[in-house]
Amino acid sequence: MGRIAAPFGVLGWVKVQPFSEEIDGLLDFPVWHLGRGAQWREVKVSEAHVQGKTLVARLPGCNDRDAAAALKGLEVAVPREALPQAAENEYYWSDLIGMDVENAQGVALGKVADMMGTGANDVLVVEGERERLIPFVKQVVLEVDLNARRLRVDWGADY
């Protein structure tokens, strides 16, 4: 849902770069999970609010700039069950990452390694024999099969 980008001020607050569509999306969740890889911990957010174009938060035990700097780079997540159900034909990026991608001719293009928001539309970052950037729009994405973990796209193997 985001990552801790930097300390904010001298009292232990942190800047959070949200990955949600709305900057204040994380404010809906009083408990965050902080970590990376296999190392995660749950924290109850003491205070948080929008500050300009970013989110700032005060976390328990983080009382000075040095403590805030030590958190820089940690990912911010919330439990999946806390998220609202995705609307029909809408997907959480985390559901798409790792899916196999094949084109309409059945040619395997690789796996979704990441997603990017461009403002105009989301983009699949597909890693295979080479990296492909495929727009996640209905004209290109023909089928999303969450159960089979597969995307079918109208995208040439030579694009």
Image (tube, grey):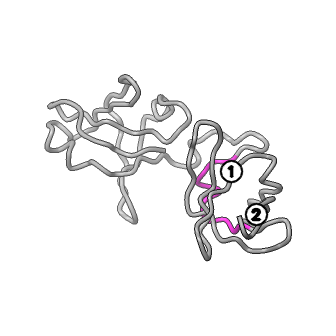
Residue 85, picture quadrant: top right
The residue located at (59%, 47%) in the rendering is: 81
Mark 2 falls on what kind of element?
loop
Which label lies toward us, 2 or 1? Answer: 1
Instruction: Please give the residue where the numbered disc 2 appears in the rendered image.
Output: 147
The residue located at (27%, 48%) in the rendering is: 72
Question: Residue 73's x, y, as percent?
Answer: 32, 51
Question: Residue 12's x, y, as percent?
Answer: 19, 35
Task: Work out whether residue 87 or residue 40 is closer to the camera in this orientation and state it.
Answer: 87
Q: Which mark is residue 62?
A: none
Q: Which residues are magenta?
A: 91-101
Residue flagged by tag 1: what amino acid is it? Answer: Pro
Badge 2 crowding class, 10 Å Cα cut-off, few under 14, some 14 to 19, many 20 or more, is few
Instruction: Please give the residue where the numbered disc 1 appears in the rendered image.
Output: 135
**Number of disc labels:** 2
| Distance (Cα) linking label 2 and label 1 | 22 Å
Question: Residue 144's x, y, as percent?
Answer: 77, 57
Instruction: Tell which residue pokes out farthest to the front in this image.
Output: 158
Task: Work out whether residue 132 or residue 98 is closer to the camera in this orientation and state it.
Answer: 132
The residue located at (25%, 39%) in the rendering is: 60
The answer to whether 54 appears left or right of 58 in the picture is right
Residue flagged by tag 2: what amino acid is it? Answer: Asn
Q: Is residue 40 magenta?
A: no
Q: Is residue 95 magenta?
A: yes
